[in-house]
């Protein structure tokens, strides 16, 4: 389990299926397939897409994690996230994505993470930028235009916010920035459907 100040990231389990079906609007069979794929990836790679729960109440609020993809013919590790809208206004999404970014770079030999964000999804671009990702351009995926965001472990922005020592690994980005924006406040975005 990965913990932040306010949230816990837990490996997907079959008993999470009803919560996940309600959130993703997937059918039970699709949802169970996605859960099983993530369990297998966790066993093979040591990381996956995690379900996110509030620490204080254990309420399910969405997902955040990484998976292996191919981008322009090259293997990449994708960082993705989505939380219920009502939990976005206090930047928990940034906190969770930032903590996962640090966890991946601390524990795995991965040079960079990418996020594919629809060009119409402005709130997610703010989240990507808040965790030190930089826009590398656009790409058409299934007929939709996406921004390609990337953070590399050797980029100056990443090194400035990563901190040093084990105690800094899961600290929220908000503690490293004096004037952190609230990028998700009052903004609506489409919910991605996992494949």
Image (cartoon, helix red, strand yellow):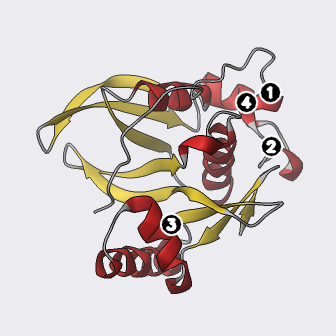
Residue 179 horizontal/vertical position (percent): 76, 14
Q: CA distance from mark 4 to mark 2?
A: 10 Å
Q: Quadrant of the C terminus?
A: bottom left
76 w.r.t. 120: above or below: below
Q: Residue at x 77, y 30 (%)?
A: 174
| Residue located beneath label 1 in the image | 176
Q: Residue at x 41, y 35 (%)?
A: 189
Residue 87 shown left or right of residue 121 in the figure: right
- Seen from the viewer's position, the closer of residues 7 and 17 is 17
Q: CA distance from mark 3 to mark 2?
A: 20 Å
Residue 5 shown left or right of residue 185 in the figure: right
- Whether the residues at callouts 2 and 1 have beta carbons within 8 Å, the answer is yes
Earlier sequence position, callout 3 versus callout 2 = 3
Element on which disc 2 rests: loop
Q: Residue at x 41, y 31 (%)?
A: 149
Q: Quadrant of residue 2?
A: bottom right
Q: Quadrant of the N terminus?
A: bottom right
| Residue located beneath label 3 in the image | 48
Q: Around disc 3, counting alpha carbons within 10 Å, would you say few (fewer than 14), some (14 to 19), or many (20 or more)?
A: many
Q: Residue at x 54, y 77 (%)?
A: 16
| Residue located beneath label 4 in the image | 161
Earlier sequence position, callout 3 versus callout 1 = 3
Residue 45 shown left or right of residue 6 in the figure: left
| Residue located beneath label 2 in the image | 171
Element on which disc 3 rests: loop
Earlier sequence position, callout 2 versus callout 1 = 2
Residue 9 horizontal/vertical position (percent): 66, 63
Q: Quadrant of residue 90?
A: top right
């Amino acid at each position: 389990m990965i913990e932040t100040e306010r949230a816990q990231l837990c490996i997907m389990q079959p008993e999470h299926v009803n919560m996940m079906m309600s959130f993703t609007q997937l059918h039970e069979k699709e949802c169970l397939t996605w859960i099983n794929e993530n369990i297998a990836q966790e066993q093979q790679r040591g990381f996956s897409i995690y379900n996110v729960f509030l620490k204080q109440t254990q309420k399910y609020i969405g997902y955040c994690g990484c998976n292996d993809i191919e981008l322009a013919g090259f293997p990449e590790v994708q960082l993705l996230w989505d939380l219920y809208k009502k939990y976005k206004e206090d930047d928990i999404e940034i906190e969770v994505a930032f903590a996962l970014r640090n966890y991946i770079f601390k524990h795995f030999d991965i040079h960079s993470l990418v996020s594919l964000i629809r060009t119409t999804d402005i709130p997610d671009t703010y989240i990507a930028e808040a965790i030190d990702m930089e826009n590398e351009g656009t790409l058409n995926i299934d007929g939709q235009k996406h921004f390609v965001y990337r953070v590399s472990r050797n980029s100056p922005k990443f090194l400035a916010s990563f901190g040093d020592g084990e105690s800094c690994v899961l600290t929220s980005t908000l503690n490293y920035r004096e004037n952190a924006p609230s990028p998700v406040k009052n903004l609506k975005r489409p919910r991605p459907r996992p494949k």
